[in-house]
Amino acid sequence: MKLDKEAMTRRRFLKTSTQVTALAGLSVATQAYGAGNDRIRIGLVGCGGRGTGAAAQALSTGEDVILTAMGDAFDNRLQNSRKNLQANEDFGPRVKVSKDKCFVGLDAYRKVIDSGVDVVLLATPPGFRPQHLKAAVEANKHVFCEKP
């Protein structure tokens, strides 16, 4: 049997295997792609300046992101944050936090996590963050958490 040196060079092997891998990846990606109308519901824990800024950045990422729950230890911070976010002309209409989804107190983080959100934004003081992060992870939520 005669071996054809052109049949399988290293270059040809790499080219062929790369093409096969790319095609296999494309077929999986089209099957795994989510529906185009899925909404991402976010909940904010910690409604001070940093939390309001984090929520604004999240809402600025696209039309499919909505804020549905907020929690803070202090009602005035929560209400100011909610009012400021709703007043934004770009994403204000996607701030859909009803009064029954505004949670106040030291247990507000648990109520936000349990409110049906997909993502929890944690912008609380660093001393509280470990227990908030643990609760969100245990509830299988996606989390944005600032570093201390």
Image: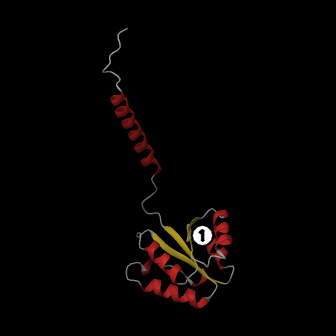
Residue 22 picture location, percent across and down:
39, 41
x%, y% of residue 71?
A: 60, 80
Instruction: Tell me the residue that label 1 is attached to.
Output: 116
Look at 49% across and 67% down and name the residue there. 40
- In which quadrant of the rendered image does the N terminus lie? top left
Residue occupying the far left of the picture: 6
Q: Position of residue 60 (x, y in %)?
A: 41, 73
Q: Is residue 8 left or right of residue 107?
A: left
Most foreground residue, 10 or 102? 10
Number of dots carrying numbers? 1
Task: Assign a secondary structure to mark 1.
Answer: loop
Q: Quadrant of the C terminus?
A: bottom right
Q: Quadrant of residue 107?
A: bottom right
Question: In the visual, does 143 lie left or right of 1?
Answer: right
Closer to the camera, 8 or 29? 8
Residue at 43%, 81% (x, y): give it. 92
Q: Looking at numbered disc 1 in the image, what kind of residue is underneath it?
A: Gly
146, above or below 35, in the image: below
Instruction: Pinpoint residue 61: horizontal percent, then vertical percent.
Output: 41, 69
Which residue sits at x=61%, y=89%?
Answer: 75
Residue 126 seen by the camera: yes
User: Does residue 102 appear anywhere in the picture?
Assistant: no
Task: Name the residue at the top extreme.
Answer: 1
